[in-house]
Image (tube, coloured by chain):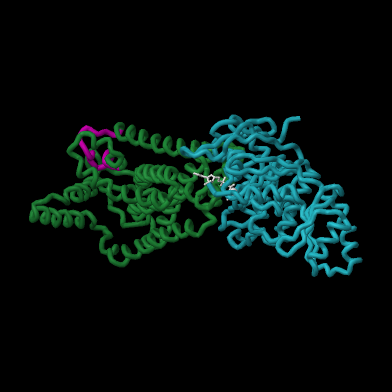
Chain colours: A cyan, B green
Amino acid sequence: MTASMELQDVHKSIGNKQIIKGLNFSIKRGEVFGFLGPNGAGKTTTIRMMVGLMKITSGDIKINGLSIKHNFKEAIQHVGAIVENPEMYPFMSGWNNLKHYARMIPGITDERIKEVIRLVGLEKAIHEKVGKYSLGMRQRMGIAQALLHKPSILILDEPTNGLDPAGIREIRTYIRNLAEQEQVSVIVSSHLLSEIELMCDRIGIIKNGELITVEEVQDTNTENDHVTVKLDVDDNEKVKSILQDQLELEAKIVQDRVVANLPKRIVPQLVRKLVEEDIAIYEVAVERSRLEDKFFELIGENTIA
Amino acid sequence: MLNFISLLKNEQMKLYSRFATWSMYIILAVILFAGALIVFVFDNIDEQTYNDNWKEQLAQENEELLEVNEEVEYFGFDSEIAINEYHIENDVKPLPYDAWQFTLENAGLSMIISLFTIIVAAGIISNEYRWGTIKLLLIRPISRTKILFSKFVSVLLFSITMLAFLFIISLVIGAIFFGINGWNPSLVQMGTDGVEEVSIFAEIFTQYGLNMVNLVMMATFAFMISTLFRSSAMAIGLAIFLMFTGNSIIGFVAEYDWAKYILFANTNLNQYFGSGSPVMDGMTLGFSITVLVVYFVLFLLVSWFTFTKRDIAGN
Ligand SMILES: Nc1ncnc2c1ncn2[C@@H]1O[C@H](COP(=O)(O)OP(=O)(O)OP(=O)(O)O)[C@@H](O)[C@H]1O
Ligand SMILES: [Mg+2]
């Protein structure tokens, strides 16, 4: 089976500046792929090339096996996208905005438009001018226009930008549903791991135009995974010695927290022990480590080019 | 094809969803109304109408005009005199001022339509950039060439609609103020070979059509500038500046032979019709049409090349 999308040694230069320096990766059908990187890493530039807004300096991008360079019309038919902010015509109603894009692709009925409006929950405001919409509503409009033609690939550039936690959760649910129930492949970019890790199957980390790594997002319930636990307790020294002497774990005190790295299955045992020892526990923070650490390492040394 | 009509529908929808577009129609209607009112109040049309002794009236008028002509030793009234004589000789009673003549005079207002069309042409591409909607527009299974072409045709459609509006509103307002002399009265005027009698309807059609040439050329120019620089302000500014200074520019350089290749020497095709005379020696209607077509194609090619080849990058 051909990949939904395949990037083959994609380069982009603007003037003398190399912005994208050879990207190679592919996205499987029904997969949610996170495209993560700090500001200026080249996420939007890559997405612009994926949808044919920018020319590829060298290399190629294949969509369901079709080159976006050489078969633009056939390739783009499979794609729905938001590139950066979901800008709409502010002086027209939501309905007319969708109608406008619907007219550009054969076979989209008014019924389908209504269906999409229901899906994104904009029924009430659809006949009002988009200029009056909140940012969250405009993001929904953006998703609606991208879904009109039932694309098999959905590309969303920072779809969580400006959304509140409830909005982010909602988008997460849409995206998971699309991927799992309709086998849509989804590419979501973001510069915040926390906003997309829960919806992605894999995350590619990009920095300065290069792909650093592609990671599977681990199922957080694997009990043998090591996690970092940060404990906020009344007596740091006592807790540290309990961990070291009785549970035989490495522990240190960082910023007034006791920090230890341990298999996830030990966590309940640890809490029980502390309760038995009559320790006052204010907080037990469990952090999944690898991806986050990796990302913070990257962000830490990132300088916007 | 169906596809192309959908694109035209989209462009018209975007155009007419904005108040700015409607205000152009309102402004035009207000100007027409004011014009009719001024003619009605100040021109004393009743005094100019002719009674049963209209032949004597015309002869009298001619004597007065002749006197004036001789006094100032300038024969500016020659054509009026000739027209009056034509009326007398051919037994054609001059018709009173009416809606048709009002409409014919308003052909000059196509200058305002040119202005509005320039504004529309200058915005139709650059606004998509300004609104950021260009990104959503160009990720559909439609070639950029087709999108560009649909926008250009939409500009022409707009100007034709506006011209039709000018024509119809002129007739209506004219009929209300001055009445109307039947459905196709004739008009006696100075032609290339002396005085002639023409259908006023045909004359209106010719005048509106000739003005359309200038309009289309300037709109295409504005369209090109706005595609090139993605700035409607710049396109409007340049196009209007050139529209108003074009003739003086020709005046300055008329002594050089190459001046006849300048766009503005050719946009006014009136120079080859009626009592007009060519801007420069050696120019013919065929020559002007060729020059116009070359400019037109050039403007469109430049637009096409920039629009289809350019990266849509962030601002
Ligand atoms: N038109 C352009 N001309 C020159 N450089 C550009 C242009 N567009 C983008 N860049 C540069 O390319 C790099 C990548 O930009 P891009 O917008 O792709 O980053 P991003 O990962 O989307 O960042 P963000 O998280 O801020 O959206 C940046 O360094 C930017 O300065
Ligand atoms: Mg970006």
Segment colored magenta: B268-285
The spot of residue B219 in percent (x, y) is: 40, 45
Residue at the spot 87% in from the left edge and 61% down from the top edge:
A271
User: Number of labelled discs?
Assistant: 0
Please tell me in which quadrant of the rendered image residue A31 appears. top right
Of residue B97 and residue B93, the one placed in the foreground of this image is: B97
Please tell me in which quadrant of the rendered image residue A106 appears. top right
**Residue A74 visible here:** no
Q: Is residue A292 left or right of residue A89?
A: right
Q: Height in image: B255 above or below A125?
A: above
Q: Is residue A257 left or right of residue B307?
A: right
Q: Height in image: A245 above or below A76?
A: below
The spot of residue B48 in percent (x, y) is: 26, 60
The spot of residue B108 in percent (x, y) is: 33, 52
Q: Height in image: A164 above or below A8?
A: below
**Quadrant location of the N terminus of chain B in the rendered image:** top right
Determine if the magenta segment contains residue B14: no
Of residue A289 and residue B157, the one placed in the foreground of this image is: A289
Please tell me in which quadrant of the rendered image residue B280 appears. top left
Residue at the spot 22% in from the left edge and 48% down from the top edge:
B83
Residue at the spot 71% in from the left edge and 54% down from the top edge:
A194
Q: Is residue A145 left or right of residue A19?
A: right
The spot of residue A279 in percent (x, y) is: 85, 68
**Magenta stretch, overall SS:** loop
Residue at the spot 88% in from the left edge and 69% down from the top edge:
A278
**Residue B59 visible here:** yes
Determine if the magenta segment contains residue B281: yes
